[in-house]
Amino acid sequence: MQVTETQAEGLSREFQVTVPAAELDTRLLSRLNEIQGEVRIKGFRPGKVPVSHLRRLFGKSTMAEIVQAVISEVAQETISERGERAAQQPDFQLPEEAGEAEKVLLGEADLTYTMKYEILPTFELGDFKSVKVERPIAEVTDEEVETELNRLAENARTYSAKGGTAEDGDRLTMSYVGKIDGEPFEGGGDENASVVLGSGQFIPGFAEQLEGLSAGEEKTITVTFPEDYGAEHLAGKEATFDVSVKDVESPDEITLDDELATRVGMESLEQLRDAIRQQIQNQFGIATRQKVKRQILDQLDEVHSFELPPKMVDQEFDNIWRQVTGELSNSNRSFEDEGTTEEAARDDYRKIAERRVRLGLVLSEIGEKNSIEVSEEEVQRALSAQMRQFPGREKELVEYYQNNPDAVAALRAPIFEEKVVDFLLELVDVTDKTVSREELMKDDEDDMPTGGDASPTP
């Protein structure tokens, strides 16, 4: 076997590999001898089938398995002997000449192919103790608790039947059939829908035309779907709805008492207030964590500069770009609507991809240098959380993760990242700063995009 390096530029590696036909044939005969005692062929006693006969029957298929095994072995041995770490699985280019592959499988030609891969860069980690983080902390005020309590009470408001016509704030129960050009369209009908007038639940112009109706009345209304409506086949189109009002109810007065708490699953109003306060505190805690993490990642990005594996960047960019263009398509918007151009957007998201790959490699290196690992128990907890989101499909999800190592890696990555961030928080200089709710919850993504969380591969 001969492995010849043909390229070693930057992080790219390329090799020309030749495996003599004689070596493949030796492996083939060894494998056929192994299966000689396993196969059962009519006319031959067990274990007595001639190898020459097995070669005629299974030679090509067995050789194909051997070729696959050899290619994998060569890759692993080459990378290991060179002390390199491959960024991704190597690419293999087999001869494209007609009949060449057939000759290899028949043992009539050497196996020759090209192997390419990119290696992970080597770099020095920066001084974490020089990282300074300002941790924003917002206190939960009584006013915020009461605001949330009133919002919850509004959502849990009860209604009572009323006589007369519907007006703003009333709840209507109705059936309706939507039509475009006189023909009913999919998803445009409901037999028992409810709408609170003035709530903005339906598309603009729909609920407003229901005001003044009474129980038992019918009306055909005309509306136009917004240009950015989620269902593309309806966006911007005019539709009619044949509406039949079943009930009209007026809103009851809101009372903040133990009865309200009971309706939402709490024992008392005070217990409900405590639960709301805790919920807000949790939201603030998540926001604080994200801002601290963002500061750490920003500074890690600033102090690390090294060559990135191009294919890793390309893959990350492709993932981001699919998401971006998919969201634009679903909302029926364009880059021009977002105040940019496709070319400028590509440049911005390419920078984001580079940032994510760079930070992923940095966090991975930190984790490796400091023996930070994700336990199987942590992976199982993440898997359980996934299964809770898809009740009834637990078995399907388990099988999916069992058969997809990349999916398991996707479960591990965010856990690993958070553990590395926790480790860094013990080392960096952290100063607490009291801020308002508005400042804490402000979306930093209003700025020019520089990337979100890293996606390390531990």
Image: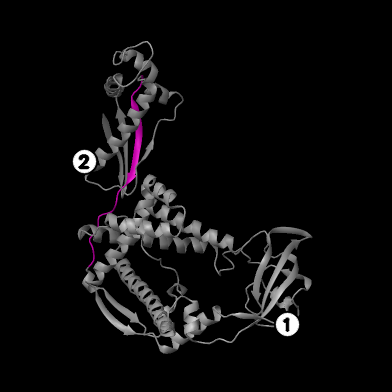
Name the residue nearer the viewer: 424 or 248.
Answer: 248
Quadrant for the C terminus, please: bottom left
One can see residue 443 in this view: yes
Left or right, residue 13 beside residue 142: left
Furthest residue to the top? 43
Q: Mark 2 highlights which residue?
A: 81
Q: Residue furthest bottom?
A: 143
Q: Is residue 332 left or right of residue 297?
A: right
Quadrant including the N terminus: top left
As for residue 118 lying within the magenta part, the answer is yes
Along the line of sight, which residue is nearer the eye, 258 or 308?
258
Compare residues 140 and 136 and report the one nearer the observer. 140
Q: Which residues are magenta?
A: 108-126
Residue name at image x 40 percent, y 76 percent: 283
Secondary structure type for disc 2: helix
Residue 319 falls in image quadrant: bottom left
**Label number found at residue 163:** 1
Q: Is residue 37 magenta?
A: no
Point 64% across, 60% down: residue: 232
- Counting from the top left corner in percent of width and height, residue 355 is at 37, 62
Question: What amino acid is found at the position of numbered circle 2 in the picture?
Answer: Glu
Q: Is residue 20 above or below residue 85?
A: above
